Amino acid sequence: MPDKLDAIDRQLLSLLQANAREPAAILARKLNLARSTVVGRLARLEREGAIAGYGVRLGHKLEDAAVRAYCFISVLPKTPAAVIRELSKIPEVEEISSVSGPFDYLVFLRCETHEQLDDLLDHIGLLDGVKQTQTSIVLSRKLDRRNAIGAR
């Protein structure tokens, strides 16, 4: 984590969360800074790990059409690395988090259809080392602060 984020760093990060493709010149104008200052801050924030990368946020047409689910996974002893390696090969697996409680991992899945999700869950359940799964399908998103988008 960076040494310290000042108010300008936080504003810059907020602007980038809203639009990661915003040119440095426009960011500079919005922050009332020189372009070179913004470029320097971006480089520092990247170097210090405050910015891990830039990506694409799906538009509501694709997002709303997707079948999203959270799958809790419990694994057998001595198999976590192998299970994570296999899950990482599956394109529909968007995120894997280690969690506390009765399960070991929480996996975020995105599929095009319910049938695809059903097949994927069968596949995950059959992976060597997977002991148990429990899945909840996302019905709607009420708040998403990660992408600066409110409820839909």
Image (cartoon, helix red, strand yellow):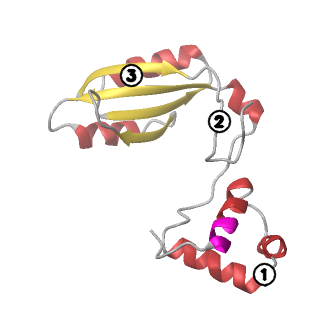
Q: Earlier in the sequence, mark 2 or mark 3?
A: 3
**Residue identifier under label 3:** 123
Vertical comparison of 125 with 46: above or below: above
**Residue identifier under label 2:** 143
**Residue identifier under label 1:** 33
Question: For the residue marked with disc 3, what is the amino acid?
Answer: His
The answer to whether mark 2 and mark 3 are in CB contact below 8 A is no
- At label 3, counting other C-alpha atoms closer than 10 Å, the crowd grade (few under 14, some 14-19, many 20 or more) is few
- Residue 110 in the image: state x and y as whole percent: 56, 30
Q: Quadrant of the N terminus?
A: bottom left
- Residue 119 in the image: state x and y as whole percent: 46, 17
Vertical comparison of 128 with 79: above or below: above
Question: For the residue marked with disc 1, what is the amino acid?
Answer: Leu
Residue at screen point 34% across, 21% down: 133
| Viewer-nearest of discs 2 and 3 | 2
Left or right of 15 on screen, residue 98: left
Question: For the residue marked with disc 2, what is the amino acid?
Answer: Leu
Dominant secondary structure, magenta: helix
Determine the secondary structure under disc 1: loop
Q: Which residues are magenta?
A: 7-12
The answer to whether mark 3 and mark 1 are in CB contact below 8 A is no
Q: Earlier in the sequence, mark 1 or mark 2?
A: 1
**Magenta segment includes 9:** yes
Q: Residue furthest left?
A: 77
Determine the secondary structure under disc 3: helix
**Magenta segment includes 60:** no
Left or right of 68 on screen, residue 58: right
- Residue 140 in the image: state x and y as whole percent: 65, 24
